[in-house]
Amino acid sequence: MIDSLVTFVISMSGGSAALGIVLFTLAVRLLLLPLNVRQARTTKIRERLAPKVAQLRKRFERNPERLLKETSALYAKEGSSPFAGFMPALAQLPFMWLMFRVATHPTALIGHDLLGAPLGQQVAGVVAHYGLASAPFLVFVAIIALVITVAWLSARQIKITEDQPAYLRKLLPIMPYGSVLAVLVLPLAAGLYLLVSTAWAVGERAVLARLPLATA
């Protein structure tokens, strides 16, 4: 299945695996757009209700069942649910898994490169084969730099709300930088996928944040 998918991705761009990964990633992100719009709406509702949820937590901290009931009723008035944001995120996982498998396929990317840098190689392999003073290594450096920039922009978009646990408030701002670590250990094709996907996500959130999504 994955072999056929990789062949399709490469063929859809006229034989360029790098371009195929970009086009395939963009196509899937477009397919997931309705789910992300729904998730953005849920996020706005959660942010608006955060102070009221915090008050409920203090009031019913010793009565979890009553807290859940009151919180659910609060969200129901907005036509939403405390758990509504999880379903769109879960629905994205199969598509993200497919894109990741395409970008990390061990054999189908042999002979394909991005500006001279092999798509199937990790940064350590590129250094070993070409050295630090080489065009392939500079391609990796450029991808890593761009992923760091996108991760920084993504971290700036994260909004911490009062209803979130303390550990989550500390963890959320650093989570986007996980993509940087991934690029350092995964093949260049995966780095290209992560760059395109996360850059789309940052732009998408910026646009959706300005749209009136708070109504059903």
Image: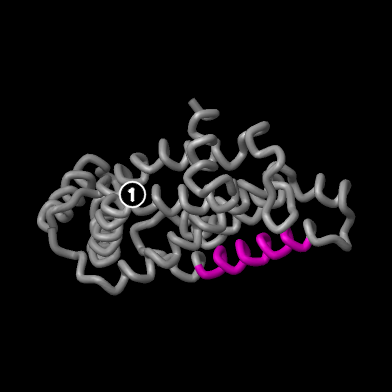
Residue 172: within the magenta?
no
Q: What residue is drawn where x is 69% and y is 49%? A: 113
Q: Is residue 54 left or right of residue 25?
A: left
Front in this rendered view, residue 58 or 51 = 51
Tell me if residue 158 comes above or below residue 128 in the rendering.
below
Crowding near the residue tagged with mark 1, few <14, some 14–19, many ≥20 C-alpha atoms within 10 Å: some
Where is residue 165 shown, x and y percent of the image? 42, 54
Residue 149: within the magenta?
yes
Front in this rendered view, residue 197 or 58 = 197
Tag 1 residue: 32
Q: Is residue 10 left or right of residue 142?
A: left
**Is residue 58 visible to the viewer in this orientation of the structure?**
no
Determine whether the residue tagged by mark 1 lies in a helix, strand or loop: loop
Where is residue 15 shown, x and y percent of the image? 57, 45
Where is residue 72 shown, x and y percent of the image? 18, 48
The colour scheme of the drawn protein is one colour
Tell me if residue 209 comes above or below residue 131 in the rendering.
below
Q: What residue is drawn where x is 20% and y is 70%? A: 212
Q: Which residues are magenta?
A: 138-153
